[in-house]
Image (tube, helix red, strand yellow):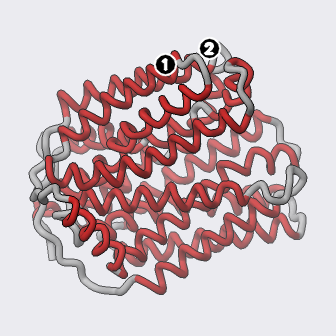
Amino acid sequence: MTTTAERTAPSRRAQLKFVLVLGGLTAFGPLSIDMYLPALPRMAADLHATDSTVQLTLSAFIVGLALGQLVLGPLSDALGRRRPLLAGLALYVVGSVLCAVSPDAWLLVAARFVQSLGAAAGIVIARATVRDLFEGTAMTKFFSTLMLVSGLAPILAPLIGGQLLNWTSWRGVFVVLTAFGALLLAVVVFFLPEPSAARSPLRLGPVLRTYGRLALDRSFAGYALASGLLFASMFAYISGSSFALQGVYGLSPQAYSVVFGANGVGIVLAGQLNGRLVGRIRERALLRSGLLLGVTGGAFVLASVLFRAPLALLLVSLFLLVSSIGLVMPNASSLALASHARSAGAASALLGVLQFVVGAVATPLVGLGGPGTAVPMAATMAGFAVLALVAYLALTRDHAVTASPAGPPTS
């Protein structure tokens, strides 16, 4: 059945505006996590801190990102999207400034936690806003379009950070993040209206019951786990590919950058292909195809490493697995949120938290075998891809989703 959102399509100008604004908001987390990674050794030396202490800045950010989404998702369901988003963006700018001027490592850890709470607002509210504005295949197509802006962020952020370090210190990286947050704050003030959506009361009991209901919803859990577990494969790739491809296979930093960028382009291309196919092919079929592509790529990655296949086969296999994110994420997000219009913020929060929690579990597994082998990375990537497919097959049901009408965005 054709929905309201699908009957009245927004103008191209309105589509572009929402893609740029919401894409920028969803890129907050990856940019803030990955852009400063190349600077960690310099930070430790400059702040006279141990490597483990400086690495706590990453842990603090991930914890804050998870907690912030859990709080801000239901808050936006009760108060509307704009006010929590504006407060979060302002908090992000303040946290970024504190990061740039922190005199020691422990104050930097605290500043990163503040920064992460603001970044959480951008991620969780952007996804909930898409649910407010669209439904059905229109929502899936919009999530696919967002991959143009947000899909490259986790891939290119370390490269951007490395280039920044050629002409500035690690503090300059946080200055750039401050400017990015301030720019998005101004854009939201002037160009992102409050979407029309039903509001839920902000009381602890109902909020906890909402989270419990979502967690016990088999279909929601299946779609959330499918996207979160496959996302963990990409976390393993991001954290381990530099060591594997350069240390084990001998790629130069320049060649590795080309491979890294090509895989990022693969995510974007798969997302755009998904957007063209949605409406002709059911979202569940596209999601299943993406998961099968991820499992196939993961199996070939593991086989390439175990049997010492030519590097070209490994690179093609990595491309297949990483590109599958572009098919899985838009469809899984759309299907997970489809039946939860009144609690889109809370549902969006659980989706985001699951991705980062499972990703945080996957990351240390990559280094278990030491620096001389790529097997742990390959096994982690393949294993989480298989788990994603199993979660989808075991928990989701093939059913028609009935959702409350949501109007299209206006220019």
CB atoms of marks 1 and 2 within 8 Å: yes
Judging from the image, what secondary structure is the residue with disc 1 in? helix
Q: Quadrant of residue 51?
A: top right
Residue 359 is situated, as x and y percent measured from the top left of the image, at: 57, 57
Residue tagged 2: 168
Most extreme residue toward the top, as rendered? 167
How many numbered discs, if any?
A: 2
| Relative to 247, 78 lies left or right | left
Q: Which mark is residue 175?
A: 1
Q: Label 1 amino acid?
A: Val
Q: Which of marks 1 and 2 is nearer the N terminus?
A: 2
In this orientation, does residue 225 appear? yes
| Residue 199 x/y as whole percent | 11, 57
Q: Residue at 50% across / 35% down in the picture?
A: 32
Residue pictured at 22% horizontal, 60% vertical: 204
Give coordinates of residue 402: x percent, y percent.
18, 77
Q: Report which quarter residue 140 is drawn in.
A: bottom left
Report the residue at 72% width, 60% height from top: 365
Vertical relation: 47 (above or below) 230:
above
Left or right relative to 241: residue 350:
left
Q: Residues within 10 Å of mark 1 (few under 14, many from 20)?
A: some
Residue 155 has which mark? none
- In what quadrant of the picture does the N terminus appear? bottom left
Amino acid on which disc 2 is placed? Thr
Q: Nearer the viewer, residue 99 or 394?
A: 99
Residues under labels 1 and 2: Cα distance? Answer: 10 Å
Q: Where is residue 360 in the image (x, y as percent from the top left)?
A: 59, 55
